[in-house]
């Protein structure tokens, strides 16, 4: 069981309200919901258990269950490039364009507003597949400069996932 402060303990720890000893107040300070009585023994020494029990009985501490460990998430292999989030929408140039707009905002709007505005305008004007791919390549080159090859490569993989199958050839 883990030890957690109660509202009564928080009130005790406020300036001017001192009904407990310094040792008891120190124990209250350490009770954060992640430490057990055994953890307290490492700091306060043997014999701390009666003090912990007295603070629980007095309403200064409460025993809480530890949170369950997080469930690991396994990526689902689809035989294509993997992304951080699953995409189940329609593959299209419009979807790709929206993804590129999003990347532009996230990576360049603050860092390089002039480049971001130029890229946004170019994406708006990219009316066919070739123009869209040319702009995505220019963006990937800039991403590689500022964030590295791995980041550019992962974005290129995502673009390949979003493009219709016949246009899914983007090189980073």
Image: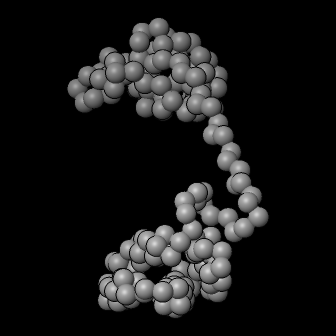
Residue beneath the point at 65% across and 79% down: 166
Q: Nearer the viewer, residue 29 or 7?
A: 7
In the picture shown, does residue 154 fall above or below 61? Answer: below
Residue beneath the point at 62% across and 81% down: 167
Residue beneath the point at 26% across and 22% down: 17
Q: How many marks?
A: 0
Left or right for 121, reference 98: left
- Which image quadrant is residue 13 in? top left
Q: Nearer the viewer, residue 23 or 110?
A: 110
Q: How is the image coloured?
A: one colour
Left or right for 88, reference 72: left
In the picture shown, does residue 68 fall above or below 81? Answer: above
Where in the figure is residue 33, as x and y percent of width and height? 51, 30
Q: Residue furthest top?
A: 57
Placement of the N terminus among the 4 image quadrants? top right
Where in the figure is residue 62, as x and y percent of width and height? 48, 17
């Amino acid at each position: 069981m883990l030890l957690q402060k109660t509202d009564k303990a928080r009130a005790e720890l406020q300036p001017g309200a001192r009904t407990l000893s310094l040792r008891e107040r120190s124990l209250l300070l350490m009770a954060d919901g992640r430490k057990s009585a055994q953890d307290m023994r490492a700091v306060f020494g043997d014999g701390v258990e009666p003090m912990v029990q007295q603070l629980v009985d007095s309403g200064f501490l409460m025993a809480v269950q530890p949170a369950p460990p997080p469930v690991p998430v396994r990526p689902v292999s689809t035989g294509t490039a993997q992304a951080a989030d699953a995409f189940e929408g329609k593959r299209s140039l419009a979807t790709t364009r929206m993804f590129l707009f999003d990347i532009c905002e996230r990576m360049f709007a603050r860092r390089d507003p002039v480049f971001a505005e130029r890229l946004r305008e170019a994406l708006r004007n990219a009316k066919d597949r070739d123009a869209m791919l040319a702009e995505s390549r220019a963006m990937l080159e800039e991403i590689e400069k500022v964030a590295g090859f791995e980041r550019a490569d992962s974005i290129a993989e995502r673009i390949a996932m979003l493009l219709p199958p016949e246009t899914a050839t983007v090189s980073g």
